[in-house]
Image (cartoon, rainbow, N blue to C red):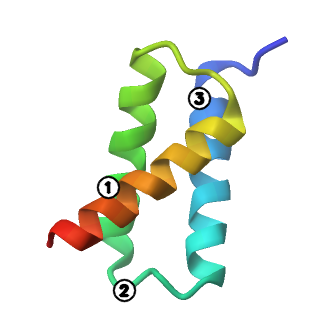
């Protein structure tokens, strides 16, 4: 059974945020939140509904964003 969409997005974002915060990778909280949320929303629209997969891919997207900047 899958989670309803808003809690799925919120939980995935929180997992990614907690990981990045614990690893000391968050420099700009607003920018971090925007990148993570954009990545999660894009993945959900593509059909991904696994919470941990969304979190992990959002972390990857954030790291790619940071390298590009």
Which residue bears the numbered disc 3?
Answer: 6
Q: Nearer the viewer, residue 58 or 9?
A: 58
- Left or right of 69 in this view: 64: right
Q: Quarter of the image for the N terminus: give it.
A: top right
Q: Earlier in the sequence, mark 2 or mark 3?
A: 3
Q: Circle 2 sits in a helix, a strand or a loop, which is it?
A: loop
Q: Which callout, 2 or 3, points to the residue nearer the camera?
A: 2
Q: Earlier in the sequence, mark 3 or mark 1?
A: 3
Residue at the image point whose x is 38% and y is 41% from the top: 39
Q: Position of residue 22 (x, y in %)?
A: 66, 82
Which numbered disc covers residue 27?
A: 2
Give the CA distance from mark 3 to mark 1: 16 Å
Residue at the image point whose x is 45% and y is 55% from the top: 60
> Seen from this angle, which residue lies furthest right?
1
Considering only vertical position in the picture, is 14 above or below 17?
A: above
Q: Position of residue 18 (x, y in %)?
A: 65, 69
Which residue bears the numbered disc 1?
Answer: 34
Q: Circle 3 sits in a helix, a strand or a loop, which is it?
A: helix
Q: Circle 1 sits in a helix, a strand or a loop, which is it?
A: helix
Considering only vertical position in the picture, is 15 above or below 46?
A: below
Tags 3 and 1 touching, CB below 8 Å:
no
Q: Dot 1 surroundings within 10 Å: few (below 14), some, or many (20 or more)?
A: few
């Amino acid at each position: 059974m899958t989670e309803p969409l808003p809690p799925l997005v919120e939980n995935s974002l929180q997992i990614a945020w907690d990981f990045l915060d614990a690893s000391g990778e968050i420099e700009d909280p607003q920018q971090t939140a925007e990148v993570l949320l954009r990545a999660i929303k894009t993945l959900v629209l593509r059909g991904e509904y696994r919470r941990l997969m969304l979190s992990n891919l959002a972390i990857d997207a954030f790291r790619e964003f940071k390298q590009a900047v």
